[in-house]
Image (cartoon, grey):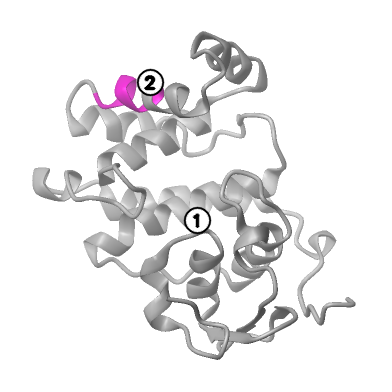
Amino acid sequence: MADGTKATRPDTWPDIWGTIHTERHALLADVEDLTPGQWATPSLCTGRSVRDTLAHMAATARMTPPGFFAKLARAGFRFEVMTAREIAELTTGTPADTLAAFRAQLDSVSHPPGPVDSWLGETVVHAEDIRRPLGIARGYPMTALTRLADFYRGSNLIVGGKRRVAGLTLSATDTDWSAGSGPEVRGPMLALLLAITGRRVAHTELEGAGCRP
């Protein structure tokens, strides 16, 4: 590509939903025995606990395009209000209830309107929002990470990734991937993905002239 991107094209990795399902199952295994204190731990999503974030993932995984627009309309077309209502619904009972709601959607292919890469990103990035504060490590498929980095750096949808990394060269140190032009930011692929999506916790793993405070 003209900007120096080296990446796997989408048509070389067709089973996105299979990866989404695998990652949901892996996250369930990591959180099903959490203590009450761990459920209440702040996630990387500002203002949301680990439990809130899992509830959001469950709500998204059961959503359909008609359901999305109906709920958005009832929220006065305020996305954050709709999201908060969905989280509140799935955190009203006990953590076990929230866990059950997520478990029920492990193999779902339902989703709100939007590209399938959004739902892969929803799964991987929010899983890190949960895992990192709990000190849980996960080795994600590298092809998934590079695909998501390409997706988010090319779009301002929801997380503003394109705007965030404009004018930077991003270079992975653990796989053959680079993208963009300008001062370089280097680091592990997962850390780059988290930085693109606005997770500042990953900045300590990055280096280069393009690193910003």
Query: In this rendering, is residue 75 above or below 55?
Result: above
Instruction: From the top left corner, tell me how far across and down residue 114 is, in percent.
Output: 70, 36
Judging by the rendered image, the residue that carries numbered circle 2 is 85
Instruction: From the top left corner, tell me how far across and down residue 132 is, in percent.
Output: 31, 64
Local packing at callout 1 (Cα closer than 10 Å; few below 14, some 14-19, many 20+) is many
Q: Quadrant of residue 200?
A: bottom left
Q: Amino acid at mark 1?
A: Val
Mark 1 vs mark 2, foreground winner is: 2
- Residues in magenta? 85-91
Q: Is residue 135 left or right of residue 68?
A: left
Mark 1: secondary structure: helix
Q: Report the residue at 63% width, 46% height from top.
A: 118
Q: Amino acid at mark 2?
A: Arg
Q: Report the residue at 62% width, 64% height from top.
A: 144
- First in sequence, mark 1 or 2: give its number: 2
Q: Is residue 40 left or right of residue 68?
A: left
Q: Is residue 90 magenta?
A: yes
Query: In this rendering, is residue 204 above or below 50?
Result: below
